[in-house]
Image: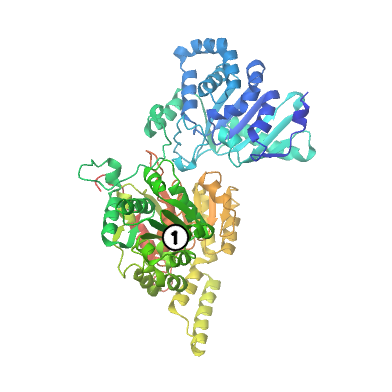
């Protein structure tokens, strides 16, 4: 019989104050079960830290642990697997482990963080057939993810995954005596971080609870089908020489893990080369950043027009550092639109692996938001402020004339400054600031908003961008990835044509009333007809029937939430791994997407700009304008290369209006530009 501990298991567990999934759920079950079968996206050796309390049962009793995971494992586990399957030394290894397993167990109970002991325990369990590991890969995809360093015994970072095409299931079950079964599903992977530290949840289904049985059986049947190779959508790899070779090749392509001491995504600072400074390969690749710094130091005021993903933020850090070292500033302000972008700036400043950021922290206290602005205003010397674009006028208004002369203000995504209210608020004070830096991939507000474009330029000396680095240049240099472009043809229906007629009728009526409709408003309302046509939904559904694989690591941009609801109905036919991320949605959805725990995110403008998702594979753009500005921002979300040796190729799904009577298509300018841009290829000599 099982213990009372098992019979009193709760219906859900989460990592929170006083509760850990690994300690309070996994470990008690492992102490008593006969079999533990697990499907998981990530499996790392660190998971065994959560097993330590059950170690005597694992060693002494008849138990089987079966793990089915993606090939995304850490290097420590890879080394253990390799050693266990080296026929030459296998028998000697088994005997050595059997002789010493009691000592190993005792050592692990005293020190669960002993990585060598964990490796020996895993080896013992494998060689005595108590632990079996298989790997799964979706058949729709060819790439295999690469692997993390053993010294980063942590939940693998989805920002470091080369390809999101992976087995990403997260469920499992335990079997006990007397046909008692406990199954679970949720967000948790099989790693120490996921089982103990991350914000994770697991729903539990118990065979003795009538209401749980149906859900429990779903988990058991689905996982058994995966494990036994009955799921025709995945391919199963047992641990053999070829599988280990596959993993090893990817590990070697990444780096020398045995000598790696810091996370692989560490960003190497790029300084402006001095005369006696030998330029590194990275510095040469990103030399546009040093050039941009040099131009700004000379101009003092201006906009850097740099393609998304080419290092506008890092360039700004260099400018802060240089101006401080020159004694030109003792205060800086960074302003942008949206909480996500502000949070990202804060992470940049507090990145412990960026020497430039650390240098700034040595000399500046960082304040964030309207509340902390009060502390900043008391004495801004030696301080940096991160504040929203709607609050920045309050911050600069409080600077004295002398303080303004020693201040650098950075307007990130400077095109967001382009409203009359914002311009009016900052204009009286902005001109007093000596150093004014604008950052944007798209500072031009578009064909029907030239007035605002000029108003923005006026805040930066009335000049065009003082430095430009384009998306095409970035692709050719290998900073951004190449991409495949697919434009789906659509036509307008009768409802769309009636919507056009309503716009024209309203234009005529307003003209008669003496309140003419501005051309910008008219253009926006006509564009919305194209952006909201139902026929785009039809052709997208048809496309998915032949290409369901596109719904892996994908952001879908829509014009409004109501239209997004129609997209969700289509998605539900192909996947349940999706969420929305609109202005009021839970921020955790974005984090889940970044970590690869959901496949599709449907959004409006919430992540069109600024947010860094290097491993985003695909975008679908339902909401596309004539001009390229909005598209450039959205394109920039998926062209960022992940920090790995193996680069991705993105896919962009767009829509092309088939016009009637030989008229120019609404989408023609944008589609032609994207087609041409998709031809850009990496050039090692660029």
Residue visible at 75% across and 37% down in the picture: 213
Q: Secondary structure at mark 1?
A: strand
Q: Is residue 507 above or below residue 36?
A: below
Q: Is residue 555 visible?
A: yes
Which residue in the protein does label 1 denote? Answer: 335
Left-right relation of 69 to 184: left
Left-right relation of 381 to 63: left
Say which of 430 and 77 sits in front.
430
Left-right relation of 511 to 105: left
Say which of 596 and 668 sits in front.
596
Q: Is residue 685 above or below residue 328?
A: above
- Please identify the quadrant where the N terminus is shown: top right
Q: Position of residue 678 (x, y in %)?
A: 35, 54
Q: Position of residue 334 (x, y in %)?
A: 42, 58
Q: Is residue 654 above or below residue 177?
A: below
Residue positioned most to the left: 275
Q: How is the image coloured?
A: rainbow
Q: Residues within 10 Å of mark 1 (few under 14, many from 20)?
A: many
Q: Position of residue 648 (x, y in %)?
A: 40, 44
Q: Position of residue 683 (x, y in %)?
A: 27, 47
């Amino acid at each position: 019989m099982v213990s009372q501990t098992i019979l009193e298991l709760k219906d859900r567990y989460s990592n929170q104050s006083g509760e850990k999934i690994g300690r309070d759920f996994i470990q008690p079950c492992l102490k008593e079960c006969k079999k533990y079968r697990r499907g998981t996206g990530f499996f790392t050796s660190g998971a065994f830290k959560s097993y330590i309390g059950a170690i005597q049962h694992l060693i002494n009793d008849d138990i089987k642990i079966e793990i089915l995971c993606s090939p995304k494992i850490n290097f420590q586990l890879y080394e253990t697997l390799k050693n266990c399957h080296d026929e030459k030394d296998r028998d000697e290894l088994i005997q050595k482990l059997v002789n010493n397993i009691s000592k190993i167990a005792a050592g692990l109970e005293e020190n669960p963080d002993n990585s060598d002991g964990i490796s020996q325990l895993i080896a013992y369990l494998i060689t005595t057939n108590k632990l079996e590991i298989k790997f799964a890969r979706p058949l729709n995809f060819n790439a295999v993810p690469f692997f993390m360093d053993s010294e980063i015994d942590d939940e693998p970072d989805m920002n470091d995954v080369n390809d999101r095409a992976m087995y990403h299931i997260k469920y499992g079950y335990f079997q006990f005596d007397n046909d008692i079964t406990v199954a679970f599903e949720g967000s948790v992977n099989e790693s120490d971080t996921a089982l103990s530290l991350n914000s994770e949840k697991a729903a539990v289904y118990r065979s003795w609870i009538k209401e749980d049985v149906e859900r429990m059986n779903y988990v058991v049947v689905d996982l058994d089908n995966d494990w036994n190779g009955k799921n025709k959508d995945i391919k199963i790899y047992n641990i053999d020489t070829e599988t280990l070779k596959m993993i090893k090749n990817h590990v070697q392509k990444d780096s020398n893990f045995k000598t790696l001491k810091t996370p692989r995504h560490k960003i190497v600072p790029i300084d402006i080369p001095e005369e006696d400074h030998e330029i590194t390969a990275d510095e040469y690749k990103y030399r546009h950043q040093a050039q941009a710094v040099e131009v700004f130091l000379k101009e003092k005021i201006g906009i850097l027009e740099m393609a998304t993903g080419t290092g506008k933020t890092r360039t700004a850090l260099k400018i802060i550092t240089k101006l401080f070292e020159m004694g030109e500033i003792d205060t800086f302000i960074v302003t942008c639109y949206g909480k996500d972008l502000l949070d990202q700036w804060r992470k940049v400043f507090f990145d412990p692996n960026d020497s430039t950021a650390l240098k700034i922290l040595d000399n500046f206290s960082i304040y964030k938001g309207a509340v902390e602005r009060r502390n900043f205003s008391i004495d801004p010397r030696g301080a940096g402020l991160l504040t929203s674009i709607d609050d920045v006028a309050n911050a600069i208004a409080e600077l004295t004339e002398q303080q303004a002369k020693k201040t650098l203000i950075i307007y990130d995504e400077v095109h967001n400054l382009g409203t009359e209210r914002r311009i009016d608020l900052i204009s009286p004070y902005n001109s007093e600031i000596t150093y004014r830096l604008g950052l944007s991939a798209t500072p031009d507000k578009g064909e029907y908003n030239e007035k605002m474009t000029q108003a923005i330029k006026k805040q930066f000396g009335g000049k065009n961008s003082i430095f430009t680095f384009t998306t095409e240049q970035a692709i050719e240099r290998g900073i951004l990835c190449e991409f495949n472009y697919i434009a789906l043809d659509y036509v307008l229906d009768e409802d769309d044509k009636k919507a056009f007629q309503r716009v024209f009728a309203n234009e005529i009526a307003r003209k008669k009333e003496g309140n003419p409709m501005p051309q910008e408003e008219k253009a926006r309302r006509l564009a919305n007809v194209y952006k909201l046509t139902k026929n785009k939904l039809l052709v997208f559904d048809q496309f998915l029937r032949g290409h369901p694989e596109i719904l892996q690591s994908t952001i879908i941009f829509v014009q409004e939430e109501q239209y997004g609801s129609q997209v969700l109905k289509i998605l539900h036919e192909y996947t349940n791994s999706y969420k929305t991320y609109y202005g009021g949605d839970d921020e955790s959805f974005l984090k889940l997407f970044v970590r690869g725990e959901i496949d599709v995110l449907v959004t409006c403008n919430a992540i069109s700009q600024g947010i860094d998702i290097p491993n985003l594979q695909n975008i679908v753009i339902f909401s596309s304008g004539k001009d390229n500005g909005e598209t450039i921002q959205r394109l920039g979300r998926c062209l960022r290369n992940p920090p790995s040796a193996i680069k991705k190729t993105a896919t962009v799904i767009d829509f092309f209006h088939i016009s009637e009577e030989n008229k120019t298509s609404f989408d023609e300018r944008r589609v032609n530009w994207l087609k041409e841009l998709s031809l850009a290829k990496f050039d090692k000599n660029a």
